[in-house]
Image (cartoon, coloured by chain):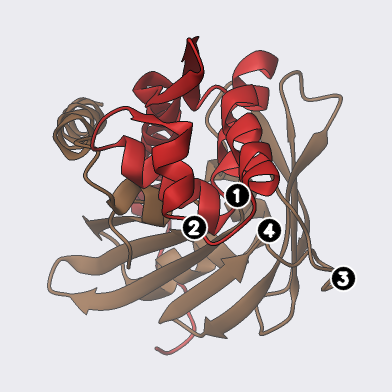
Chain colours: A brown, B red
Amino acid sequence: MNPDLDLSLQRVIRAPRATVWRAWTDPELLAQWWLPTPMSARVDRLEPRPGGAFVTRMSEDGLEFLPHVDGCFLAADELERIVFTNALDSSWRPAAPEPVAMTAEITLLEHPDGTDYRVVVRHGDPAARALHEELGFHDGWGAVTEQLAALAESR
Amino acid sequence: MAQYSAQLDGVFTALSDPTRRAVIGRLGRGPATVGELARDVPMTLPSFMKHLRVLEQHGLIRTRKSGRVRSCELARERLALVDGWLAEQRAVWEGRTDRLERLVSGLEPPKEPR
């Protein structure tokens, strides 16, 4: 985890792990939450197993669907963990997604109220070392994060 | 949006080289002349100048010539694009999790044994 270029979030979701897992691995369910309205998602390939394809498309008008994710799963441990990347496309060809490649790891843990849901997104880090230098951005970044958290919770 | 995207690509491109990142790191401590920057780098001056031009093209540094000396300074606002972009990525994942949560709280638990 590189705090300058990776992001992590954690949330308790009031639903059993099996339900959250199903929402991730059933194409019809994934399409319902993958993109914010008014955009709509179409799930072309969803093969949650190591090396399996993960391809989604997005549309603003529900008619014309443009490429969204073209990646593959690196791990899929039933009820527990999903890892996918767009650094390799769905045919395992090394890809150069804009502006940087990422690997997302979603972990589902048992929680008394449902599911402890965690996401870590690791971005390709050409910028990481430069940002590590004493550039003084961290204060700004913390403030932005708090604003976003407040916004997310007020919805 | 397209311009923003192109700027962001430029920033990531400019930062994808160790020499250029070292220059950014050095300029983070304050402006410096080309001569001062080149002194720390084990390469020929023409090669080093190419790196400076990449940084300048993508708006990460500004250079100014006074007499025979060219001085460089960091354009912090351009580097801050990376922070803005990260904040967007966070918003994407927060939003996704909100929607997943809303969906699964309305779903019946699956029938199969756990």
Residue type of the residue flagged with mark 4: Pro
Q: Position of residue B58 (x, y in %)?
A: 61, 26
3 vs 2, front mark:
2
Work out which residue is located at the far top of the displayed protein and give it: B66
Circle 1 sits on which residue?
A: A100
Q: Earlier in the sequence, mark 3 or mark 2?
A: 3
Viewer-proximal residue, B14 or A141? B14
Numbered circle sitting on residue A27: 4
Residue occupying the point 37% across, 73% down: A107
Numbered circle sitting on residue A136: none
Residues at marks 4 and 2, CA–CA distance in whole angstroms: 31 Å
4 vs 3, front mark:
3
Circle 3 sits on which residue?
A: A91
Residue occupying the point 55% across, 25% down: A37
Q: Earlier in the sequence, mark 1 or mark 2?
A: 1
Residues at marks 3 and 2, CA–CA distance in whole angstroms: 24 Å
Residue B21 drawn above or below residue A18:
above
| Residue A99 can be seen, yes or no | no
Within 10 Å of disc 3 (Cα), the crowding (few <14, some 14-19, many 20+) is: some
Q: Position of residue A9 (x, y in %)?
A: 28, 55
> Horizontally, is A101 left or right of B111 in the view?
right
Within 10 Å of disc 4 (Cα), the crowding (few <14, some 14-19, many 20+) is: some
> Horizontally, is A142 left or right of B69 in the view?
left
Circle 3 chain: A
Residues at marks 4 and 3, CA–CA distance in whole angstroms: 19 Å
**Quadrant of the snapshot with the N terminus of chain A:** bottom left
4 vs 2, front mark:
2
Viewer-proximal residue, B19 or A61? B19
Circle 2 sits on which residue?
A: A125
